[in-house]
């Protein structure tokens, strides 16, 4: 099954590449590896502002991380020249979770993105990962995720 058939089955429409909020580009490719810049969680087109341990649940965070993964797929689609079937492997995901000092479920929040990547790419979507709790993320967003992929 092609990646696009899977996206259709999941009722996912890829968004356009997000416009960077500062002095950087959405992605950089070197050889057959593409590095996607961090994408923040958005809700209703605006930064999804919240902090775990204060005013957002882990389950809501999984939804936020899933939404970020969809945005990352839109950028990856562009990086692949418009063909996500060129993705050979999702190599690494790094997730920053806006958290209070006593929140310890960053890994569960990040599962929202990891699980979606696995659904879309199957074995090619299984990746290495880091999930960090941080004191703040740009614009107050609850989650920011970056991704590294290998293209074939």
Image: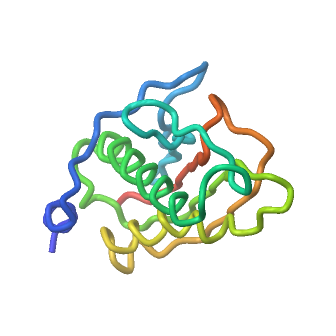
Residue at point 62% right, 43% down? Answer: 50
Is residue 2 toward the left or the right of residue 102 in the image?
left
Q: Position of residue 28 (x, y in %)?
A: 50, 38
Residue drawn where x is 50% and y is 25% of the image: 20
Quarter of the view holding residue 84: bottom left
Report the side of 21 relative to 79 (left or right): right
**Which residue is the extreme one toward the right?**
101
- Position of 64 compared to 96: left or right? left
Task: Give the percent coordinates (x, y) of residue 27.
Answer: 48, 37
108 w.r.t. 81: above or below: below
Picture quarter containing residue 19? top left
Looking at the figure, which quarter contains the C terminus?
Answer: bottom left
In-front residue for pair 43/72: 43
Position of residue 46 measured from the top left corner of the image (x, y, whole percent) = 45, 30
The residue furthest top is 23
Instruction: Give the left or right position of residue 110, taking residue 44 as reference.
Output: right
Outermost residue to the front: 55
Residue lying at 28% horizontally and 40% vertically, measured from the top left: 15
In the image, residue 16 above or below residue 9: above
Counting from the top left corner in percent of width and height, residue 36 is at 50, 44
Q: Is residue 49 above or below residue 80?
A: above
In the picture, the quarter occupied by the N terminus is: bottom left
Residue at 32%, 44% (x, y): give it. Answer: 74
């Amino acid at each position: 099954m092609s990646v696009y058939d899977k996206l259709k089955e999941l009722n996912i429409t890829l968004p356009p590449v997000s416009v960077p909020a500062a002095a950087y580009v959405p992605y950089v490719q070197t050889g057959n590896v593409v590095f996607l810049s961090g994408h923040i969680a958005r809700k209703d087109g605006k930064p999804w502002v919240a902090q775990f341990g204060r005013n957002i649940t882990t389950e809501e965070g999984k939804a936020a991380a899933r939404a970020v993964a969809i945005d990352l797929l839109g950028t990856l689609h562009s990086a692949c020249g418009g063909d996500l079937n060129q993705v050979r492997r999702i190599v690494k995901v790094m997730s920053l979770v806006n958290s209070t000092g006593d929140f310890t479920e960053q890994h569960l929040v990040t599962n929202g993105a990891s699980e979606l990547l696995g659904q879309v790419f199957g074995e090619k979507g299984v990746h290495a990962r880091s999930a960090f709790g941080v004191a703040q993320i740009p614009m107050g967003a609850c989650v920011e995720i970056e991704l590294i992929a290998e293209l074939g």
